[in-house]
Amino acid sequence: MEMPKMSLLAWQKKYGTEKACAKALYKVRWPDGFYCPRCGCKKPSYITTRKMHQCSQCKYHVSLTTGTLFDSTNLPSVKWFWTIYLVAADKGGISALRLAKFSRYRNDCWVKNESGFCSGSHAVFETQ
């Protein structure tokens, strides 16, 4: 897939807050709206103190990042979105060491690198 033609400044303006990143992640994860991975119910409630969706039928808790590359990381979504931009904008990919120059979170990137994320995988987000 091809990276949208977007400058880093435009990317930062669009995905510069945790709220904007969460909104984009929600659209990608559940394009047709939330559904429970356990029972398929489409009626969630949101637990603001835990930042999780709860199925109204089976009471299963689902976080927005569960099962994604953002799962089990303390790195803010904004920094992950910067990383996505840097990886996708660089034609040959970007190394974990090069990413370390942009962030103090080299260990998080290194862990994700083991699964292939920082070694050239591309993520595409709508530019609309």
Image (tube, rainbow, N blue to C red):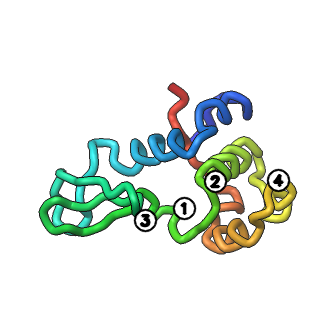
Between marks 1 and 4, how big is the CA–CA gap? Answer: 18 Å
What is the residue that sits farthest to the left in this orientation? 57
* Residue displayed at 57% across by 48% down: 123
Residue type, mark 3 in image: Thr
Q: CA distance from mark 1 to mark 3?
A: 8 Å
Mark 3 or mark 2: whose residue is earlier in sequence: 3
Q: Which residue is mark 2?
A: 80
Q: CA distance from mark 3 to mark 2?
A: 15 Å
Q: Is residue 61 left or right of residue 19?
A: left
Q: Position of residue 87 (x, y in %)?
A: 71, 50
**Residue at image location 64% in from the left, 68% down from the top:** 112
Note whether 59 is above or below 35 in the view shown: below
Q: Nearer the viewer, residue 65 or 17?
A: 17
Q: Residues within 10 Å of mark 4 (few under 14, many from 20)?
A: few
Dots 1 and 2: beta carbons under 8 Å? yes
Residue where numbered disc 1 is placed: 70
Q: Amino acid at mark 2?
A: Trp
Q: Residues within 10 Å of mark 3 (few under 14, many from 20)?
A: few
Mark earlier in primary sequence (1, 2):
1
As drawn, the label of residue 102 is 4
Q: CA distance from mark 2 to mark 4?
A: 11 Å
Q: Amino acid at mark 1?
A: Phe
Residue at which label 3 appears: 66
